[in-house]
Image (cartoon, rainbow, N blue to C red):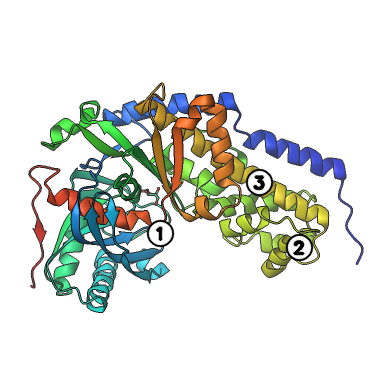
Amino acid sequence: MTEKKIPKDGLRTAMDDLKRVFRVSVPEANRIIYDFHREMVRGLSCKKSSLRMLPAYVDRPTGGEKGKFIALDLGGTNLRALEFELKGFGRSGKPKIMKFTLSKEEMDADSSRFFDFIAKSLKLFLKKEKIRDASALGFTFSFPVRQSGIKTGILVCWTKGFNVKGVIGRDVVGLLTKALIRNRIRGIDITALVNDTVGTLAAKAYSDRNCDVGIILGTGTNACYIEPVNNIIKIKSYGRYSSSNMVVNVEWGNFNKLKRTVFDDILDKDSANPAEQILEKMVSGMYLGELARIVLLHFNERGLLFSPTSRKILSKKGIFKTDHMSGIEGDSLYGLKTIDRLLNSLGIIGSTLSDRTAVKNICSIISERASRITAACTAAIITRMDPDLSRMHTIAIDGTLYEKHPNFSKNMRQCLIELLKGRASRVRISLAKDASGKGAAIIAAVAMKGAWRGAKICKTTES
Ligand code: GLC
């Protein structure tokens, strides 16, 4: 087999073009910050905005909360049930956790089947851990929910490929309560409904008073932060609340004031929710691999990458995962052997070193843009809370993209330094592993103290 001849200049020019269109320069990042601030203000005041700015009806925990609490944590394709003991003084025990995997059928099912799956999983967990006493439960539901109190909220839309019928526009706590009744689960009070970002913030803030931002960088991406209640203009109609601050779920995945490439447009057009979750499609683990595949295919079609026989493989939607990118970008072996192995496993045989170098560059360009967009939006949130960075801020981040990708955290930090300069030292980023579920248990405790006055305890009884 003769090695194909790649026009070297062609590849270099194409790579330079790609770098240019994916670049988030400092002026560009500052523009993102400016637009993000504007969208935050609009979202808080009910004006049309790509940032939903959903009030969470809860303040940060004090660290003094005590007791055993249960949580259900529905994030991406995993559901986790856990019991968590809070010991006060910011201390906690080791959680008991049970993990369940949702199938594609459950993600596309109807409402009763979906919530029955959650209830049945909880039942198994309660049985396994022999939990019989009445318990308060925090429910982490990682989707955009418009709450009107700490334990009630209406699903605005599905994200991350979920499409369960009959849930949009309905109260998810009500639907779960009914499923608990159907499945004869007694003694569970759902005392809090929590977004995963809010859970992450709460889990860290329980032991760190400086924590005021929670971020998820996993299958999806999103952030929450602390806002003075007086600024949440749209909250007035929602009722009384006893604290002067409240966590706001930004739903930044839907931010759309971003410079997009033709590759982003292709991905968006073919997605389950075109024109929605624009930032999420440029940043999160569910989409980065697919974006890389679209670019690889484009290079292949132009004769710049792999042999034409690879085209069929590269045309398969979803074949290239964000995990693959992590492996590729982390390959520092002589001859890029890990990349070769990985390409072989996808069926792309006989790649040249130039192919593998190009693949690595393409992945880096895409993931670096993601980390810089994340940094710009993070800087926007911090400077909204504290324009001069006059105090310390801890940012709690959970999610496999941040945890596992070899360069994401480094690139994000670098961009924060470029944007905030010396003041970046006032921002501490802390990996908060598996925090969203623990945080829901903590918020269940906060809610028991009556953080939202007027909240009723939702007690389920056998039907
Ligand atoms: C999606 C959801 C959001 C969640 C995020 C991370 O963006 O809309 O609510 O926080 O994924 O799981």
For label 1, count other residues whose C-alpha is less than 10 Å away and answer few (under 14), some (14-19) or many (20+): many
Distance of mark 2 from mark 1, alpha carbons?
32 Å
In screen coordinates, is 422 left or right of 94?
right
**Residue at 33% across / 45% down in the picture?**
201
Proximity of marks 3 and 2: CB atoms separated by less than 8 Å? no
In this view, the residue farthest toward the right is 2
Residue designated by label 3: 364
Q: Secondary structure at mark 2?
A: helix
Q: Mark 2 is on which residue type?
A: Lys
Q: Secondary structure at mark 3?
A: helix
**Residue at 86% across / 50% down in the picture?**
6
Residue 232 in picture, x, y percent from top left? 24, 30
Q: Is the CB of the residue bearing disc 1 within 8 angstroms of ligand 1?
A: yes
Quarter of the view holding residue 189: bottom left
Q: Can you say which quadrant of the picture contains the C terminus?
A: bottom left
Q: Which mark is residue 76?
A: 1
Residue 352 in picture, x, y percent from top left? 83, 58
Q: Is the CB of the residue bearing disc 3 within 8 angstroms of ligand 1?
A: no
Distance of mark 3 from mark 2, alpha carbons?
17 Å
Q: Earlier in the sequence, mark 3 or mark 2?
A: 2
Q: Secondary structure at mark 1?
A: loop
Residue 319 in picture, x, y percent from top left? 60, 62
Instruction: For marks 2 and 1, give the one nearer the viewer.
Output: 2
Q: Mark 3 is on which residue type?
A: Ser
In screen coordinates, is 317 left or right of 6?
left
In this view, the residue farthest toward the front is 89
Residue designated by label 2: 337
Quarter of the view holding residue 311: bottom right
Q: Earlier in the sequence, mark 1 or mark 3?
A: 1
